[in-house]
Amino acid sequence: MAALRRDGYDFCEAGNGAEALEIMRGRAINLVVLDLMMPHVSGWDVLRERQQDAQLLDIPFIVVSASRGPEIAKAVDKGICAFLPKPFDIPALNSLVKGCLQDFRTSASR
Protein backbone atom coordinates (compact mmCIF):
# COMPACT_ATOMS: atom_id res chain seq x y z
CA MET A 1 0.00 0.00 0.00
CA ALA A 2 3.02 2.25 0.22
CA ALA A 3 2.85 2.52 -3.58
CA LEU A 4 -0.64 4.03 -3.33
CA ARG A 5 0.58 6.53 -0.77
CA ARG A 6 3.46 7.49 -3.11
CA ASP A 7 0.85 8.16 -5.80
CA GLY A 8 -0.87 10.65 -3.51
CA TYR A 9 -3.67 8.54 -2.07
CA ASP A 10 -4.52 8.82 1.60
CA PHE A 11 -6.00 5.63 2.98
CA CYS A 12 -6.86 3.74 6.12
CA GLU A 13 -7.02 0.01 6.73
CA ALA A 14 -9.49 -2.14 8.59
CA GLY A 15 -8.72 -5.50 10.16
CA ASN A 16 -12.18 -6.89 9.57
CA GLY A 17 -15.53 -6.06 8.02
CA ALA A 18 -17.04 -4.60 11.20
CA GLU A 19 -14.15 -2.17 11.50
CA ALA A 20 -14.46 -1.32 7.79
CA LEU A 21 -18.17 -0.52 8.16
CA GLU A 22 -17.45 1.67 11.19
CA ILE A 23 -14.79 3.60 9.26
CA MET A 24 -17.02 4.00 6.20
CA ARG A 25 -19.89 5.32 8.28
CA GLY A 26 -17.71 7.67 10.30
CA ARG A 27 -15.60 9.34 7.61
CA ALA A 28 -15.88 10.75 4.12
CA ILE A 29 -14.67 7.82 2.02
CA ASN A 30 -13.98 8.16 -1.71
CA LEU A 31 -13.35 4.48 -2.52
CA VAL A 32 -13.15 1.10 -0.79
CA VAL A 33 -10.85 -1.78 -1.71
CA LEU A 34 -12.58 -4.76 -0.11
CA ASP A 35 -11.27 -8.27 0.41
CA LEU A 36 -14.11 -10.78 0.50
CA MET A 37 -12.38 -13.01 3.04
CA MET A 38 -12.01 -11.09 6.30
CA PRO A 39 -12.40 -12.25 9.90
CA HIS A 40 -15.53 -11.70 12.01
CA VAL A 41 -17.55 -9.77 9.43
CA SER A 42 -16.67 -10.86 5.90
CA GLY A 43 -16.50 -8.80 2.74
CA TRP A 44 -19.74 -10.50 1.70
CA ASP A 45 -21.36 -9.16 4.88
CA VAL A 46 -20.02 -5.68 4.07
CA LEU A 47 -21.54 -5.90 0.57
CA ARG A 48 -24.90 -6.94 2.08
CA GLU A 49 -24.77 -4.00 4.52
CA ARG A 50 -23.86 -1.70 1.63
CA GLN A 51 -27.02 -2.71 -0.24
CA GLN A 52 -29.11 -1.56 2.73
CA ASP A 53 -27.35 1.74 3.43
CA ALA A 54 -27.76 4.63 0.97
CA GLN A 55 -24.65 6.34 2.34
CA LEU A 56 -22.52 3.29 1.49
CA LEU A 57 -24.08 2.85 -1.95
CA ASP A 58 -22.53 6.17 -2.93
CA ILE A 59 -19.01 4.78 -2.37
CA PRO A 60 -17.34 2.91 -5.24
CA PHE A 61 -16.01 -0.51 -4.25
CA ILE A 62 -13.17 -2.56 -5.74
CA VAL A 63 -13.49 -6.18 -4.62
CA VAL A 64 -10.31 -8.23 -4.18
CA SER A 65 -10.41 -12.02 -3.88
CA ALA A 66 -8.41 -15.15 -4.59
CA SER A 67 -11.69 -16.80 -5.56
CA ARG A 68 -12.53 -16.94 -9.23
CA GLY A 69 -15.73 -18.95 -8.88
CA PRO A 70 -19.29 -18.09 -9.80
CA GLU A 71 -19.78 -16.26 -6.51
CA ILE A 72 -17.75 -13.38 -7.93
CA ALA A 73 -20.65 -12.70 -10.30
CA LYS A 74 -22.75 -12.12 -7.17
CA ALA A 75 -20.31 -9.42 -6.05
CA VAL A 76 -20.52 -7.77 -9.46
CA ASP A 77 -24.32 -7.88 -9.21
CA LYS A 78 -24.06 -5.89 -5.98
CA GLY A 79 -22.84 -2.88 -7.93
CA ILE A 80 -19.10 -2.98 -7.36
CA CYS A 81 -16.88 -0.82 -9.55
CA ALA A 82 -14.29 -3.51 -10.29
CA PHE A 83 -13.01 -6.96 -9.36
CA LEU A 84 -9.29 -7.61 -8.86
CA PRO A 85 -8.17 -11.24 -8.56
CA LYS A 86 -5.43 -12.18 -6.09
CA PRO A 87 -2.54 -12.22 -6.39
CA PHE A 88 -2.43 -8.80 -8.00
CA ASP A 89 0.23 -6.27 -8.73
CA ILE A 90 0.18 -2.69 -7.54
CA PRO A 91 0.01 -1.14 -11.03
CA ALA A 92 -3.21 -3.09 -11.66
CA LEU A 93 -4.69 -1.89 -8.37
CA ASN A 94 -3.54 1.67 -9.06
CA SER A 95 -5.16 1.61 -12.49
CA LEU A 96 -8.47 0.37 -11.07
CA VAL A 97 -8.41 2.98 -8.29
CA LYS A 98 -7.88 5.77 -10.82
CA GLY A 99 -10.57 4.42 -13.13
CA CYS A 100 -13.18 3.91 -10.42
CA LEU A 101 -12.57 7.36 -8.92
CA GLN A 102 -12.80 8.96 -12.35
CA ASP A 103 -16.00 7.03 -13.21
CA PHE A 104 -17.51 7.97 -9.85
CA ARG A 105 -16.68 11.67 -10.27
CA THR A 106 -18.08 11.65 -13.80
CA SER A 107 -21.36 10.01 -12.76
CA ALA A 108 -21.68 12.24 -9.67
CA SER A 109 -21.38 15.40 -11.76
CA ARG A 110 -24.31 14.43 -14.00
Image: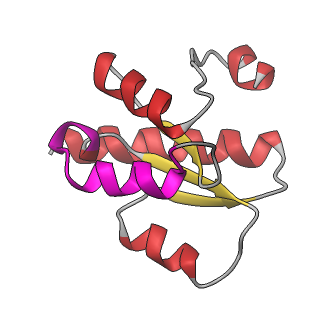
Asked whether, in this view, residue 70 is left or right of residue 21, the answer is right
Residue 77 point in image, percent of width and height: 38, 73
Could you tell me how many numbered marks the image carries?
0
The main secondary structure of the magenta stretch is helix
Quarter of the picture holding the C terminus: top left
Residue 69 point in image, percent of width and height: 67, 81
* Residue name at image x 57 percent, y 19 percent: 11
> Relative to the observer, which residue lies in front, 43 or 79?
43
Q: Judge whether 96 appears above or below 83 on screen.
A: above
* Residue name at image x 26 percent, y 56 percent: 51
Q: Judge whether 103 appears above or below 84 on screen.
A: above
Quarter of the picture holding the N terminus: top right
> Relative to the observer, which residue lies in front, 68 or 7?
68
Residue 78 lies within the magenta run: no
Asked whether, in this view, residue 44 is left or right of residue 25, the answer is right
Asked whether, in this view, residue 65 is left or right of residue 102, the answer is right
Residue sticking out furthest to the front: 40
Asked whether, in this view, residue 52 is left or right of residue 86, the answer is left
Location of residue 78 by image quarter: bottom left
Range covered by the magenta-colored residues: 41-56
Residue 43 point in image, percent of width and height: 52, 51
Residue sticking out furthest to the bottom: 70
* Residue name at image x 45 percent, y 75 percent: 74
Q: Judge whether 19 appears above or below 39 on screen.
A: above
Residue 50 lies within the magenta run: yes
